[in-house]
Amino acid sequence: VIETLDISDLWCRLLPEWEPNRCRPQRNAYHRFTVDRHLLEAVARAADLCDRVERPDLLLLGALLHDIGKGYPGDHTVVGMTLVHDIAQRMGFNDDDTRTLVLLVEHHLLLPDIATRRDLDDPATIRWVAACSGTIERLHLLSALTEADSIATGRSAWGAWKAGLVSTLVDRTEHVLDGGEVADVTTSSKRLAVNSELMARYSAGSAPLIITDGNELTLVCADRPGLFSRVAGVIAVCGLDVSEASAAGENGIVLDRFRVTSAFSKEISWTKVERELLRALNSRIAIESRLADRARSYRRPVEAPHFLEPKVRVLNEASENYTVIEVTGPDSIGLLYRLTRTIADLDLDIASAKVTTLGNDVVDAFYVRDQQGNKVTSREDVAEITMALSHALVPTSPNNA
């Protein structure tokens, strides 16, 4: 219907705010449609999800307008909130429905961003999403909009892994909005039991315990400075990418878990990874040299576009017990190794990490504490972290870019 109205030059008379978005290209690597086409695709996908929400009308209109600010100067979300408020009032929606539509625009990226960049076992994460959503009804609208928006974005924007993370986040947030305790959903007793069992199997001085399952690598061994970065380096040397990682430890024993992906093969050659990892743990592999060799042998067919400006943010409000360091910028071979090695050089312990790849850019989040188990709060230390990681974002060789 909208396409017919548009062809007849009637659509922009009904919705003049649409005009700046017509045939407007998307300036990122993962959107496959122009802005106007993406919005129409999002509505079509949202139509299949109406049975999941109490107000299908708000879902469909939210899907239609969530990116309408992209045709205007400034932050498209902030601009879109003002536009949608005026549109909703003009269409006769009451104040509560108008606030809901504005909220859908304001937080249309909330669930996917939090699910892929924050620790879902951290109570602060769930409380934040609950506060942003406000009600279960609005949470369900955000959830359906997230799926519709992602599917309409492109093939790589929505898959089983991302859908599972968003589903977990929504379930835990709904539990809290329904009056439940956040601790009931953020502590995985099963995972804690598995960790304890694995650490009990390892005895000090014995060979490292390496377990692989699907696309997950678990390492149990004696703790040492820079261990996390060394494992990340080995994974990069083997041509794999880390999508998520966590660390736990007690009594000098550490358990590191890495979820990995391969851009070149569906099946992961764990035999090679285990062999190289054992060599690295015995300091018999020059990780930096190996990564440099891999970077020199890698050539992109064309100049790769980057859309995220290099940035380092140190956040102490994002977690109850950890400082969250969020790093965004161009991806490069060995980047995770450089970042985690720099964090280790700053005498910070990494408890968990979330790694998100957006085309040729990355958004990495690290949950860290100092050697005393405290957050990093002094302005001098925050400035030092920001400077050091900003340097680590830059590849040591032009061939790495």
Image: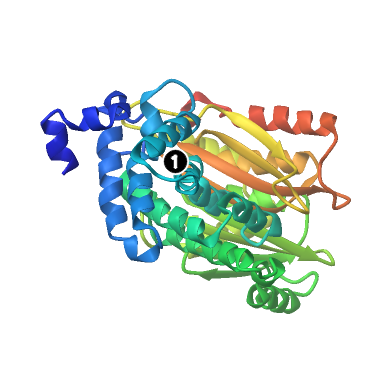
Asked whether the viewer can see residue 32, the reply is: no
Left or right of 322, for residue 229? left
Q: Judge by depth and name the residue closer to the eye, 264 or 367.
A: 367
From the top left corner, tell me how far across and down residue 340 is, in percent.
67, 44
Q: Judge by depth and name the residue closer to the eye, 282 or 178.
A: 178
The residue drawn where x is 43% and y is 60% is 163
Circle 1 residues within 10 Å: few <14, some 14–19, many ≥20: some
The residue drawn where x is 41% and y is 62% is 54
Give the vertical position of 69 relative to 219 (above or below): above
From the top left corner, tell me how far across and down residue 8 is, in percent.
10, 31
Give the vertical position of 216 relative to 295 (above or below): below
Q: How many marks?
A: 1
From the top left corner, tell me how far across and down residue 179 is, in percent.
65, 68
The residue drawn where x is 46% and y is 68% is 214
* Residue sitting farthest toward the right: 372
The residue drawn where x is 62% and y is 48% is 285
Q: Which residue is mark 1?
A: 358
Residue type, numbered disc 1: Leu
From the top left corner, tell me how far across and down residue 313 is, in percent.
67, 35
Task: Name which quarter of the figure residue 162 lies in.
Answer: bottom left
Asked which secondary structure carries label 1, the reply is strand
Q: Quadrant of the N terminus?
A: top left
Q: How is the image coloured?
A: rainbow
Left or right of 390, for residue 381? right
Left or right of 363, for residue 11? left
Asked whether the viewer can see residue 20, the reply is: yes
